[in-house]
Image: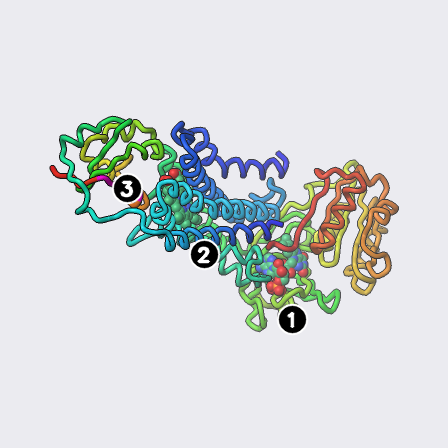
Amino acid sequence: MTPLQARSLIWVLALLPAIVAVVMLRESDLASPEAVLNYLGRLTGIAGLALMLAAAILSCRVPGFDRPFGGLTKLWWTHHQLATAAFLLLLAHPILLTLAAASVSLDAAVATLLPSGLDWALWTGWGALLLLMLFLGPGYRFFGEPDYQRWKRLHRLAAPAVVLALIHTLYLARTLPWLWEAVLWLGLAALAVVSILYRFSWSRRFGRRPYRVARVVRPANNVVELELEAEGPALTYEAGQFVYLTPRDPSLVAGRGEEHPYTLSSAPGETGLRIAIKALGDASRAIQDIAEGSRVQVEGPYGGFFPQRSSPDAPELWIAGGIGITPFLARARHLAEVGEPVDIVLIFCVQDEARALWLDEFRELATTLPGFSLHMHYFYENGPLDSTFVGERCPNVETRTAYICGPGPLLGLAQKVAHELNIPRSRIVTEEFDLL
Amino acid sequence: MIQKLTFAAFVAFWASVATVLALSALAPDSVASDTDALPEIDAETLAGHASLDDCWMAIEGKVYDFTDYIPKHPTPPSIMAPWCGREATEGMRTKGYGRDHSPAAWAMMDDYLIGTYVD
Ligand SMILES: Cc1cc2nc3c(=O)[nH]c(=O)nc-3n(C[C@H](O)[C@H](O)[C@H](O)COP(=O)(O)OP(=O)(O)OC[C@H]3O[C@@H](n4cnc5c(N)ncnc54)[C@H](O)[C@@H]3O)c2cc1C
Ligand code: HEM
């Protein structure tokens, strides 16, 4: 199963309740325009709730579970899309029902829209929808550029929103036979609860592994590479995977006890882990001064950027931008350890040579690793990356799988370049460093 | 793209809610809720309107003519049929699986009110 198929499967499962509701459509649901509106109102409620629960279930972040879906960043993306679809449907839901009631009278429409007295069914519906607006809104930049950590805390409102939505539904559901309703909603809700409990209780306690910062290396003035030593069972991982890192150093001025995703830059065969961090915000700036000997916790591994093996029969094109070099660094270090021939062209995009990280190490790898070649692209010298630049340096480019990692603009540009060079979409793999 | 779409939907949602509220605040009261002026209807008269083509029901002391409403009701007409021409409070309070109708449903009924029920 390809990652795309796996993600499509999630959509089908998430839409299953709505599909059942369509299959069980009754003649009376189509009897008049208002009956259709009311039916669509209920259908959007059903689809919205199911998509919301599916998004909740996907939030569990079990290491390894993300692999078939193309990695955790892709799974987060699916989670976003599910939630967005739910949000749009649920905005339509009360409006459709209100319009349907308007065919009787305006009073009936108002009574459908607004709860009166102790009308728990509608109060809970409204509660869920308002919470949804509150915690989803910032993700769509409703109120300007969000602060990631604040948004992450705000996002916890998802839990009460789902609970309220479920209560609302158990009050009002009437589209499906009640046994279906009960089994479906309670089943999905149970899965969501298990998922959340795993995430916030089990994985916090048992999923985070204790490590110690053994050494801090400074490849540039705004980048550190931490070398970590296991204080318990060591993590097993593949090159290019990432972890959530929680620093515990009490002297950190920001981000202490906060989890942030970082790629492992070490090769899986090394003892200990390496993580390279560029100062991109307050937490990553503060960590530049992390104390040697301090404790960190590591949760993972996540992601599935690269295939399990490399060989000259499956030639690769790597395009890295800035700190997006880290998964490639890990992979190159790993391939150097394995020592088998490969067919890989790396295009490393940075602004100028002063900003090229690990350049010496890559140059050395290019001479020792058979079949690996390195080409630097300096923005100040070469301008924006284009297909001529890549095409001239990369033989048989159309036969390669392109792996792309870097900041947003480069990611888009490199995908366009790969496309222009006739690499089919199924062989263009990206990794985003931005989750929101 | 998605951000713009969701924002547009968000604004459209609140605009619709505001429109409904504004309409209801501005529209003249549709039904005279003065029950004294309504005719009294007894069980016998009620029983004379016991078909889907001519369906009256008594609910909590009031009589409603639901003939026009039957096609709008969410369930198949056959669900309502047995209650036509009868005291139907129980049906209203325990629809389907023993649950009450929503306040919205109760609010709709005023529009079909035709009399008070005398046993
Ligand atoms: C899969 C993946 C792999 C990454 N690998 C590396 C790496 O190897 N080296 C490296 O330097 N950086 C890496 N990053 C980026 C790194 O996670 C962010 O730079 C860091 O979290 C910024 O935090 P901050 O508080 O310093 O910055 P902020 O000012 O808070 O944020 C800067 C940007 O980073 C993102 N961000 C902030 N906090 C989080 C968080 N908790 N989770 C996810 N994103 C967040 C936000 O989109 C924000 O726009 C990776 C990100 C992802 C998703
Ligand atoms: C997150 C928010 C919400 C979710 C997930 C949700 C979900 C649902 C679901 C699943 C149903 C049952 C459909 C069925 O099986 O028949 C339903 C019914 C209903 N909802 Fe919501 N809802 C939400 C918000 C609201 C709001 C804000 C209102 C306010 C007007 C509302 C009004 C109604 C009404 C009136 C019904 C009954 C429809 C009928 O039976 O004709 N809902 N909702």
Locate residue A151, reporting x and y percent. Answer: 53, 60
Dominant secondary structure (helix, strand or loop) of the stretch shown in magenta:
helix
**Subunit ID for the residue under disc 1:** A
- Where on the picture, by quarter, is residue A247? bottom right
In this figure, which residue is indicated by the disc labeled 2?
A157
Q: Are marks 1 and 2 in contact (CB under 8 Å)?
A: no
> Within 10 Å of the Cα at label 1, are there few (<14), some (14-19), or many (20+) other Cα atoms?
some
Instruction: Describe the element under mark 1 as helix, strand or loop.
Output: helix
Residue flagged by tag 3: what amino acid is it?
Met
- Over which residues does the magenta segment extend? B108-114
Does residue A317 sit above or below A210 in this rendering?
Answer: above
**Subunit ID for the residue under disc 2:** A
Side (left or right) of A12 relative to A325: left
Name the residue at 71% across, 65% down.
A223
In this figure, which residue is indicated by the disc labeled 1?
A289
> Within 10 Å of the Cα at label 2, are there few (<14), some (14-19), or many (20+) other Cα atoms?
some
Looking at this view, is A319 or A411 the one in front? A411
